[in-house]
Image (cartoon, rainbow, N blue to C red):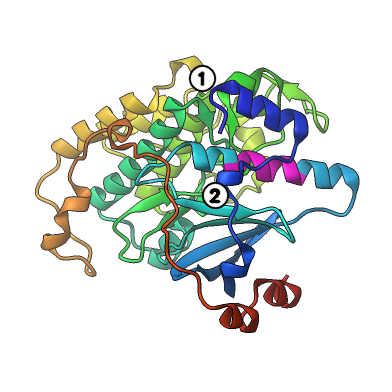
Amino acid sequence: MESGNGFYNSLEGTGFHVDAKWLIDPKCLFVGPKIGEGGHAKVYEGKYKNQNVAIKIVRRGDNPEEIAKNEGRFSREIAMLSRVQHKNLVKFIGACKEPFMVIVTELLLGGTLRKYLMNLRPRCLDTRVAIGYALDIARAMECLHSHGIIHRDLKPENLILTEDHRTVKLIDFGLAREESLTEMMTAETGTYRWMAPELYSTVTLRHGEKKHYNLKVDAYSFSIVLWELFHNKQPFQGMSNLQAAYAAAFKNERPSAEELPEDLALIVTSCWNEDPNARPDFGQIIKMLLHYLSTLSQPVFPPHMSASKNAVFLPDSPGTRTLMSAPEDSGETPKSESENKSKGFFECFRTCY
């Protein structure tokens, strides 16, 4: 794979490029039940060779403009996923370009953070559990930012829990971009309720209009997620997504931080500061969260966890210290050709997509 900005610039120019080292054989890919769906893709549980995986099928589009846009998004997501790996980022396994645009990642069975919090209502997370999740998210973001990548769509729907609910991982890099390209990036990004005000605050932007912003848009989104972790309520409750965006951008309104402990309130309010340059970076956020964690008394564990599983909530080294090399092919032997035909990738997609 090309290094530096050249690879990303080539993606921008061609719109549809996937490094050959990440292409996988679709005949070794088998699809199970659908586990998620968004505006641009559907996600299925499945198997690649002998490994349980999540299979994301990206919609190609119905017209040349839409096809070009979705192919570019597909290529960028693969570029981002293959460029970095971290324990709090979903593990990338490979991709297919034909007969469908497919992204294969590790399978996480704990569901989205959004679903987990909603099932917990009206109860809230234990403070130490909430801080543990916040640290997972902050470390994932620190890793991305250390590589110059802006996620641009940080929200509970894009945060997935492991099956034991002890770890949070960030997914969905479809809107991610390299920071060096932000001078000419579209403002039509993210989900309004979690979006930083500078993405749309100057004027009502026309479709495709360009706007300047930087890595700090993710710090704002993180502040809204952090607020949710402690309140277990929808931010800007009672407002539509557009009303929430208007309130944040034009009235400088934010969810109330009055009920939060002082140190925690400082983290939240600094991250959603109106001035992007005044927001902390994720290295600073991690230090503030660890400091706040150190001030708490002995941990109180939720009912489904025992003290023996304490480690996940104790401080870990900062995210950039836990970077790992790019994943290698597992080398597992594919199933027999006859078994491939009987459970075929192509037949399944004609049925389920």
Residue 96 image offset from top left, x and y in percent: 65, 55
At x 31%, y 56%, the residue is 125
Kind of element beneath mark 1: helix
Question: In which image quadrant can residue 197 be found?
Answer: top right
Which residue does the numbered mark 2 point to in the structure image?
A: 237
Residue 66 at least partly seen: yes
Mark nearer the N terminus (1 vs 2): 2
Closer-to-camera residue (110/243) = 110
Residue 349 image offset from top left, x and y in percent: 71, 71
Whether 341 is drawn above or below 98: the answer is below
Residue 29 image offset from top left, x and y in percent: 58, 68
Q: Which amino acid, by three-letter code, is at mark 2?
A: Gln
Overall secondary structure of the magenta section: helix
Residue span colored magenta: 70-78
Quarter of the N terminus within the rendering: top right
Quarter of the C terminus within the rendering: bottom right
Asked whether, in this view, residue 325 is left or right of residue 300, the answer is: right
At x 80%, y 30%, the residue is 208
Closer-to-camera residue (224/150) = 150
Which residue does the numbered mark 1 point to in the structure image?
A: 276
Asked whether, in this view, residue 40 is left or right of residue 287, the answer is: right
Q: Which amino acid, by three-letter code, is at mark 1?
A: Pro
Residue 76 falls within the magenta-colored stretch: yes
Residue 247 image offset from top left, x and y in percent: 62, 34
